């Protein structure tokens, strides 16, 4: 890429109905100018952009009444979405979901409320992983 061209943005889909979580995650992602963040308060039309619409999907497990968000990730995978996934879930459910995350190719499971330092470390790691694709 010639040095005068802007770097391509990594497209992030943030799925959360909680405005506090939305604000923390959005502000955190905006610290990295490479991310372009799209927010949705629910999962309606989740796969309408097609399998390659996003590079990263951040899922608030509270949107799922059953599985801490794994059913949302399963829906993404069944639709052919290959994006990296970070799952945000209540701390009490983190241990159980962490056991199942590899079955759905979840990059990371982070407890809610989101802790800034842990979130930034995870974002730096996922950014590097996306760059290697």
Image (cartoon, helix red, strand yellow):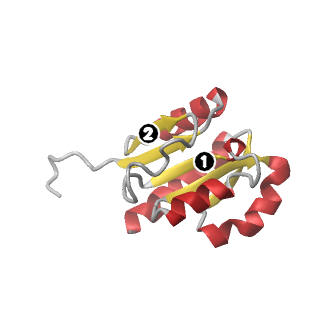
Q: Position of residue 4 (x, y in %)?
A: 14, 46
Q: Which residue is the site of mark 2?
A: 37
Whichever of callouts 2 and 1 sits on the residue coming sooner in the sequence is: 2
Q: Nearer the viewer, residue 47 or 130?
A: 47
Q: Position of residue 10 (x, y in %)?
A: 38, 50
Q: Nearer the viewer, residue 9 or 60?
A: 60
Residue 61 in the image: above or below residue 38: below
| Secondary-structure class at tag 1 | strand
Residue 92 in the image: above or below residue 130: above
Q: Who's the residue at 75% across and 46% down the image?
A: 65
The quadrant holding residue 113 is: top right
Q: Residues within 10 Å of mark 1 (few under 14, many from 20)?
A: many
Q: Which residue is the site of mark 1?
A: 59
- The answer for how far apart the CA atoms under marks 2 and 1 are is 13 Å
Q: Which mark is residue 39?
A: none
Q: Position of residue 5 (x, y in %)?
A: 17, 47
Residue 65 in the image: above or below residue 80: above
Q: Who's the residue at 22% across and 45% down the image?
A: 6
């Amino acid at each position: 890429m010639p040095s005068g061209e802007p770097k391509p943005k990594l497209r992030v889909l943030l799925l959360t109905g909680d405005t506090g979580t939305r604000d923390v995650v959005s502000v955190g992602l905006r610290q990295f100018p490479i991310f372009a963040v799209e927010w949705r308060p629910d999962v309606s039309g989740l796969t309408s952009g097609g399998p390659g619409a996003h590079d990263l999907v951040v899922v608030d497990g509270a949107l799922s009444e059953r599985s801490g968000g794994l059913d949302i990730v399963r829906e993404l995978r069944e639709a052919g979405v290959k994006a990296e996934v970070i799952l945000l879930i209540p701390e009490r459910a983190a241990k159980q979901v962490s056991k199942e995350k590899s079955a759905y190719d979840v990059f990371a499971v982070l407890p809610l409320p989101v802790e800034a330092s842990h979130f930034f470390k995870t974002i730096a790691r996922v950014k590097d992983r996306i760059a290697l694709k």
